[in-house]
Amino acid sequence: MEAGTQAQQAQAQSPPPALTGETIIAALKHAGIEYVLSVPDLHTSAGLLRPIATDPDLKLIRVCKEDETLGIAAGLSYGDKRALVLVQYTGMLYAMNAIRGIACDHSMPICMMVGLLGNEPGKPSRESSKFGVRIIEPLLDVLGIAYHRIDVDADVACIAPAIEDAYTARKPVAFLLERRPVHA
Amino acid sequence: MMDRKKAWEALARHVTQEIVVSTYSSASDWIATVDRPLNYFAVGAMGLASSHGLGLALARPERRVLVLDGDGSLLMNLGTLVTIGAVSPKNFVHIVGHNGSYEANGGHPIPNTAVDLQGIARAAGIGDVRRAETLEKFEAMIPDLLTRDGPIFVELMIQQGPLTPRSYKDMYRAARRQAFREALDA
């Protein structure tokens, strides 16, 4: 058997790369996140938001529109409570002025987890065929907001230190979910 | 109808350790009335004062949070009433000045000056909803606002302007935010 064929067979037998909601939730707890502020998103609905909703250690606040999350997270931060803003990329686009004003102009520790609905798994979002997905990283660059690409479970290790850094330095951070999280 | 400055003067006579969140014209009148470390100015985007206040109320349940909002601001974030109704923080009081005007943006009318904000708040699930058409009525309800379980929503029928001179640069400066943080931790 040719080497190339063997490698292809091995690849076919190994489980596909995965991103599990449980791994993300464990990282959020490790980072001291107590509140999750969210508008539902199909990208994170089953694998992340539903487990969060039933997790006794996390307080989920369902809001009507994404910019609410920025104000709530800011208020919580003054009381030393940590929050995660969990939204879809379209919600992030909707809330852009609040992100500009609260997270950037006033240097608030806003931690956003953004579902890139429609992004092709394994493909960098900048190369996505979807315009809305493709512009997210450039927009974050313009805003000066640090971001981390989360594609597989191995990427989740960056979450806790990045949140710690955001709250210590009072600055925003974004985690871009390039792949749909699944239940473990 | 009442003068918002008179309303804030009445409120200031009762406020002690409460967090007061304010925005735009409500904020400039409030800061001219009483400048104190536990004043929090909702920054960043119009309409989010109550969202900032909700976060503060959740983070500090031992303190009462009074949000001094405006009708134009609230209309930019009406969903907040549904969120507040669902979360239902007992220490949260939302006072909305209704003068039918985007006062801070040139005094243009809101889309429907006759909007029933009290009715919207009630329908959103806020249990204690009130309206004060006169200063006397507002003054009479202030002790309740500072002691009863919330969330409480008050529609305050106010006159338009004249605008108090304002400096957003002063209102939003970092030293104020730091003083607020320290007062909250004291």
Image (cartoon, grey):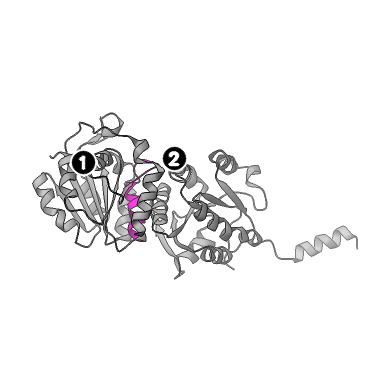
Q: Is residue B141 magenta?
A: no
Q: Are marks 2 and 1 on the same chain?
A: no
Please tell me in which quadrant of the rendered image residue B3 appears.
top left
Camera-side residue: A38 or A158?
Answer: A158
Which region of the structure is painted magenta? B41-58
Looking at the rendered structure, the secondary structure element under dot 2 is: helix
Where residue B155 sits in the image (x, y, percent)?
A: 19, 47
Residue name at image x 53 percent, y 57 percent? A163
Where residue B23 sits in the image (x, y, percent)?
A: 30, 42
- The answer to whether residue A65 is visible is no
Where residue A38 sits in the image (x, y, percent)?
A: 44, 55
3D distance between C-alphas at marks 2 and 1: 25 Å
Q: Is residue B42 magenta?
A: yes
Q: Amino acid at mark 1?
A: His
Residue name at image x 50 percent, y 59 percent? A45
Mark drawn on residue B45? none
State the quadrant of the C terminus of chain B. bottom left
Mark drawn on residue A97? 2
Relative height, residue B106 to residue B36 (above, below): above
Residue name at image x 64 percent, y 50 percent? A120
Q: Chain of mark 1?
A: B
Q: Amino acid at mark 2?
A: Asn
Q: Is residue A85 left or right of residue B56?
A: right
Mark drawn on residue B98? 1
- The answer to whether residue B73 is visible is yes
